[in-house]
Amino acid sequence: MAEETEKVSKGKKADVGDTISILSGSEKGKKGRVIVVRDNSVIVELGIDPKKDEPIKTVISHKRYKVVK
């Protein structure tokens, strides 16, 4: 049980409003703003779709991003 807590606390999780850089997947290399933080992932807004005028959102695992300072 203690080992699980240590694994979770080692990396810095993003908070709402933080900018993150995506490390893997189809959106690799893109940066976005965190809008929701979940237990195992974050929901990120990557920009605005010019055709639909709606935000582009995606879900990223905590393992697959780093917080940009």
Image (cartoon, rainbow, N blue to C red):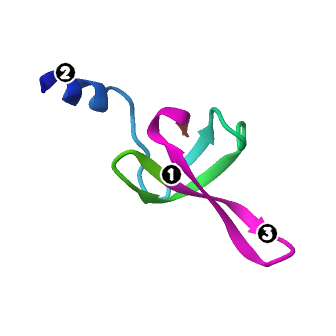
Q: Which residue is under mark 3?
A: 49
Image side of residue 15 versus residue 29, left or right: left
Label 1 sits on what residue type?
A: Asp
Q: Earlier in the sequence, mark 2 or mark 3?
A: 2
Residue 32, position in %: x, y? Answer: 63, 52
Q: Earlier in the sequence, mark 1 or mark 2?
A: 2
Q: Is residue 46 above or below residue 60?
A: below
Q: CA distance from mark 1 to mark 3?
A: 21 Å
Residue at image coords 87%, 75%: 51
Q: Are marks 1 and 2 in contact (CB under 8 Å)?
A: no
Residue 65, position in %: x, y? Answer: 55, 37
**Figure quadrant of the C terminus:** top right
Secondary structure category for the residue under label 2 = helix
Image side of residue 59 versus residue 9, left or right: right
**Figure quadrant of the N terminus:** top left
Residue at image coords 72%, 41%: 26
Secondary structure category for the residue under label 1 = loop
Q: Residue 3's mark?
A: 2
Q: Nearer the viewer, residue 52 or 34?
A: 52
**Which segment is the magenta one?**
43-65
Q: CA distance from mark 2 to mark 3?
A: 42 Å
Q: Which residue is under mark 1?
A: 18
